[in-house]
Amino acid sequence: MDYTVDSFVSKMMKAVICISALMMAGGVAVFRSSLAVGFALGIGMSMALNLVKIVWLKRCVTRAVNMETARAGAYISINYILRFVLTGVVLVAAHFLPVVDMFGAALGLLSMPFANYAVHFLVRGKKSSEPDVSDETSIEEENSA
C-alpha cells in the first residue's frame, strides 16, 4: 500500500472540505434564514484555517525530519503553539465580525479531527497486497506454489 505524507495530506484536505461542506449544508437546512449565511461563513473561515494548518503541519514535519532531535522538538513545539494561536485569532475574528457566526466557526474547527479519524479509518480498512502473517493458510499456499 502506497502510504506517503503527500497522499495523507491530500486525503486530509479532501476530507476536511467534504466534512465542512456537509456542515454548511446542515446549517443551511436547519437555519433557513439570514443566520445560515453567517453560519456558512464561520464554517468557511474554519475550513480555510484547517487547510492552512494541514499544509503548515506537513511543511513542519518535513523540515523537522532533517533536523537534530533537540532542535526538531523545539521547532515542532513552536509551530504547534503558532498553529494554536492562529486558531485563537480566527475564533476572536469570528466573534468580532458581525457577519460571521461564532458557533459556525467553532463547529468548523472540528472538521479537522473528524477528517483525521475518517482518513485513518478508511486507510486502516483497506487491505494491503501482502499476505496476513496470522493467516496460516495463505502462508502454506505460498510455500506450495
Image (cartoon, grey):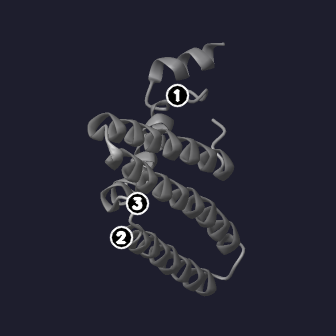
**Viewer-closest of 4 and 19:** 19
Residue 80 appears in view: yes
Counting from the top left corner in percent of width and height, residue 66 is at 72, 73
Precedes in sequence: disc 2 or disc 3: 2
Q: Residues within 10 Å of mark 1 (few under 14, many from 20)?
A: few
The residue at the far left in this view is: 30
Asked whether residue 120 is in view, the answer is: no
Q: Nearer the viewer, mark 1 or mark 3?
A: 3
Q: Amino acid at mark 3?
A: Val
How far apart are the two marked residues, 1 and 3, measured between alpha carbons? 43 Å
* Separation of marks 2 and 3 at Cα, in angstroms: 7 Å
Amino acid beneath label 1? Lys
Position of residue 117 relative to residue 60, above or below, is: above
Question: In the picture provided, is 35 more to the left or to the right than 126?
Answer: left
Question: Residue at the spot x=33%, y=41% of the render?
Answer: 27
**Is 28 on the left-hand or right-hand side of 60?**
left
- Amino acid type at image mark 2: His
Residue shown at 60%/29% (left/top)?
130
Label whose residue precedes the other's in the sequence (1 or 3): 3
Q: What is the count of numbered marks?
A: 3
Seen in the image, is 54 located left or right of residue 59?
left
Dot 2, crowdedness within 10 Å: few (<14), some or many (≥20)?
some
Work out which quarter of the rendered image holds the N terminus and state it. top right
Which residue in the structure is indicated by mark 2? 95
| Vertical relation: 114 (above or below) 61 | above
Q: Nearer the viewer, residue 143 or 84?
A: 84
For the C terminus, give its image quadrant: top right
